[in-house]
Amino acid sequence: MALQLFDRIYSKRPGFGASSQKIADFLINNLPDSNHRSIQELADEIDTSISTISRFAKRIGYDNYPELQLAIKQQLDNPDQVSADIDKHDSNMLVAEKVFRSNSSSLNKTFDLLSESSLNQAVELIAHCQQLIFFGLGASEVVALDGYHKFLRTQVESVFNSDYHMSLMQAAKMDEKDCAIVISHSGQNLDTLKMARILKENHVPIIVITSFSSSALAKLGTVTFYSASDDSKYRSQALSSLISQMSIIDCLYMSVMRDEARHNSPKLSRINSVIEQTRE
């Protein structure tokens, strides 16, 4: 299932200039009026040029304007109903339905953005690194901690620090033999970017998880994964993207565990034995 028009716009939006932002706003707010228009008609309506609309279409992943027109029609024919705002009159059960459907939609869109080559490269980096260190601030700290907890069950030496200054020191000590997983919804957080740039200067392989392909952080990744999300009146895209980000880390964790299970490792046996002792 390919990403719909609005998903493409939202994923690229942080990097838009004034002209692209103007076109994006018009499409989002006036999509039915954009259907079946020639490129000249749409340019006149938005008060921009034909070439600007053509560049916008290519910027969000379409080869030409006819492809953008087809995407407009598909968006109108298949509206994303699961991201509907929660209304103050909704019952608790309807709220639950909207939340679950929105989460399901985010996961499906995130899966569409995965590529086998990126997954293979990331798993290879993790499997052969000296240390795997997780970095995330704010809401992304929850994802980083979750990833650290998962990889503690593997043979990979994993590290996570919740304190920002300790994370900076950790980043400064890393080198090309290590691997970093850096998580940020916007990819523009200044503190996260500072850590990522220190890692880059030290030639550390970086696995980036973010929601915006045009963000500064996305460009720093050795491998970059994109998490899709739906926002609503009561939930921001940053919060909505958490489950998608965790699922990306789940994919990496399960692949590493699959490979480790093929070999009888004393270390892995000890890990499993200790975990079993915590259960009645």
Image (cartoon, grey):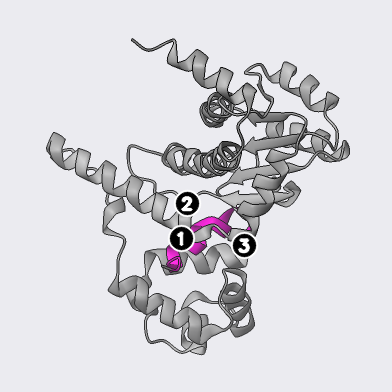
Left or right, 193 with reference to 80: right
Mark 3 or 1, nearer chain start: 1
Query: Percent x, y for residue 125?
Result: 72, 43
Give the image quarter of residue 147.
top right
- State the count of labels: 3
Residue 116 placement, left or right of 96: right
**Residue contact between numbered discs 1 and 2, judged by CB atoms under 8 Å:** yes
Q: Residue at x 32, y 48 (%)?
A: 102
| Residue 263 in sight from this viewpoint | yes
Query: Which amino acid type corresponds to the residue marked 3 in the rendered image?
Result: Ala
> Label 1: few (<14), some or many (≥20) within 10 Å?
some
Tell me the residue that label 1 is attached to: 7
Q: Are marks 3 and 1 in contact (CB under 8 Å)?
A: no
Q: Nearer the viewer, residue 157 or 215?
A: 157
- The quarter of the displayed image where residue 126 is located: top right
- Please, what is the three-letter code of the amino acid marked with disc 1? Asp
Within 10 Å of disc 2 (Cα), the crowding (few <14, some 14-19, many 20+) is many
Could you tell me how far apart the alpha carbons at marks 2 and 3 are, in whole angstroms?
24 Å
- Residue extent of the magenta highlight: 2-18
Q: Is 131 or 32 nearer to us in this picture?
A: 131
Q: CA distance from mark 3 to mark 1?
A: 19 Å
Q: Amino acid at mark 2?
A: Ala
Residue 58 highlighted magenta (yes or no): no
Task: Give the residue at x 58% y 41%.
Answer: 262
Q: Is residue 254 above or below residue 136?
A: below
Q: How much space separates mark 1 and mark 2, taking CA atoms?
A: 8 Å
**Residue at x 31%, y 73% (from the top left corner):** 76
Which residue is tagged 2? 228
Label annotation for residue 18: 3
**Considering the image in quadrants, where does the N terminus appear?**
bottom left
Question: Given this view, does label 1 or label 2 mark the residue nearer the observer?
Answer: 2
